[in-house]
């Protein structure tokens, strides 16, 4: 492997666009797979993503766009996947295990693969025969909108092979981004999945009129539940206080940029789940994550009452005002 080598971004959404900006701050060139040719054409016309973060201007001479994912992967060494988890299979369906041979594949997907109920690193390793030493994850409290505004942000690069994690950290650290390293790939992925669920619940409570005092206790209990679940599934030495766990949960639970919190806020104000999703017209990872974690936990049986209550609201149409007492009873 010649790493980082040529870096590829897979995806065209808000987070993919922010990652393209991040990578280009330290690297001369990227390959960028965008599925729709009309989006690429608009890029060439304007110099920015026509759909997301349009305030970020790109030097197009430093980008090789393609709507052919096989070509993008073939011509790259480090592959950063940044697509919503419900669309992951669709984006990768043309690829075979041979396409990923001798590649370093990094998930920037802060979600879980629906129906398979697997974090992305496990899904890639199992379905594309990629050794776990060649699979990484990049996560942390880093809203794309703040990257676009050049506000200092933080990420964690994780890989079982710590040298690969350090390589990616070096390739992404800049004046607006500090990247640390870890070997806790699955633990960090699970934290990224759970924090979206907790952000939905945070938004529900905010929409119902509960204030900062309540939110602080809710978030404290979410942190305990996150630690309990991750340690139950992936036992190892870790501190939940690190940015990739607690930091990411807090920013997603409180930030105005959090679409998961926005979804919850609308539900708390009386929208149905379906009408809230239709009005937002954006993927909210927390909706899919809630069902996946609920199903995963049938095997592990960890005590996760906040996830369970969120599930009742999102999937069984239980009114937040009916079930809020049950939530309050579990908080301490």
Image (cartoon, rainbow, N blue to C red):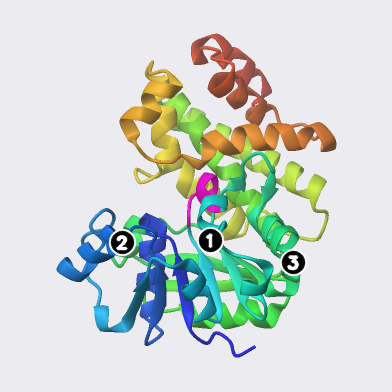
For the residues bearing labels 1 and 2, Cβ distance under 8 angstroms: no
Residue at image location 64% in from the left, 69% down from the top = 136
Report which residue position mark 2 lands on: 37
C-alpha gap between disc 3 and disc 1 = 19 Å
Q: Nearer the viewer, residue 326 or 232?
A: 232
Quarter of the N terminus within the rendering: bottom right
In the image, what residue occupies the spot 47% across and 25% down? 205
> Which stretch appears magenta?
83-88
Depth check, front residue: 221 or 100: 100
Figure check: 177 above or below 170 = above
Q: Which secondary structure lies at badge 3?
A: loop
Residue 311 shown in magenta = no
| Residue 155 image offset from top left, x and y in percent | 51, 66
Nearer to the camera, 132 or 197: 132
Q: Which residue has dot 3 on it? A: 129
**Circle 2 crowding by C-alpha within 10 Å: few under 14, some 14–19, many from 20:** some
Identify the residue at the far top of this view: 322
Label 2 and label 3: CA atoms lie apart by 30 Å
Q: Position of residue 319 (x, y in %)?
A: 51, 12
Which of pointers 2 and 3 lies earlier in the amino acid sequence?
2
- Residue 84 among those drawn in magenta: yes
Q: Is residue 8 left or right of residue 246?
A: left
């Amino acid at each position: 492997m010649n790493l980082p080598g040529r870096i590829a971004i897979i995806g065209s959404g808000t987070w993919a666009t922010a990652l393209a900006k991040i990578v280009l701050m330290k690297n001369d060139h990227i390959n960028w797979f965008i599925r729709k040719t009309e989006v690429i054409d608009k890029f060439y016309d304007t110099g920015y993503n026509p759909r997301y973060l349009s305030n970020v201007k790109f030097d197009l001479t430093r980008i090789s766009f393609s709507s052919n994912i096989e070509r993008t992967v073939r011509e790259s060494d480090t592959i950063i996947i940044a697509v919503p988890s419900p669309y992951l299979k669709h984006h990768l369906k043309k690829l075979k295990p041979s396409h990923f041979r001798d590649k370093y594949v990094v998930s920037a997907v802060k979600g879980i693969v629906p129906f398979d109920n697997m974090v992305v690193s496990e899904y890639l390793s199992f379905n594309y025969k990629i050794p776990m030493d060649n699979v990484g994850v990049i996560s942390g409290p880093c809203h794309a909108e703040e990257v676009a505004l050049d506000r200092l942000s933080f990420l964690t690069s994780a890989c079982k092979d710590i040298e690969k994690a350090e390589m990616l950290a070096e390739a992404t650290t800049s004046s607006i981004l500090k990247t640390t390293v870890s070997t806790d790939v699955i633990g960090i992925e699970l934290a990224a999945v759970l924090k979206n669920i907790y952000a939905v619940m945070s938004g529900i409570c905010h929409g119902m009129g509960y204030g900062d005092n309540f939110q602080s206790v809710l978030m404290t209990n979410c942190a305990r539940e996150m630690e309990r679940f991750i340690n139950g599934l992936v036992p190892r030495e870790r501190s939940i206080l690190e940015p990739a766990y607690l930091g990411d949960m807090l920013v997603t639970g409180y930030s105005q940029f959090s679409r998961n919190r926005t979804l919850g806020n609308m539900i708390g104000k009386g929208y149905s789940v379906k009408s809230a999703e239709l009005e937002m017209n954006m993927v909210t990872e927390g909706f899919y994550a809630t069902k996946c974690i609920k199903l995963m936990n049938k095997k592990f049986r960890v005590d996760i009452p906040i996830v369970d209550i969120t599930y009742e609201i999102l999937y069984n149409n239980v009114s937040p005002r009916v079930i809020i007492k049950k939530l309050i009873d579990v908080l301490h």
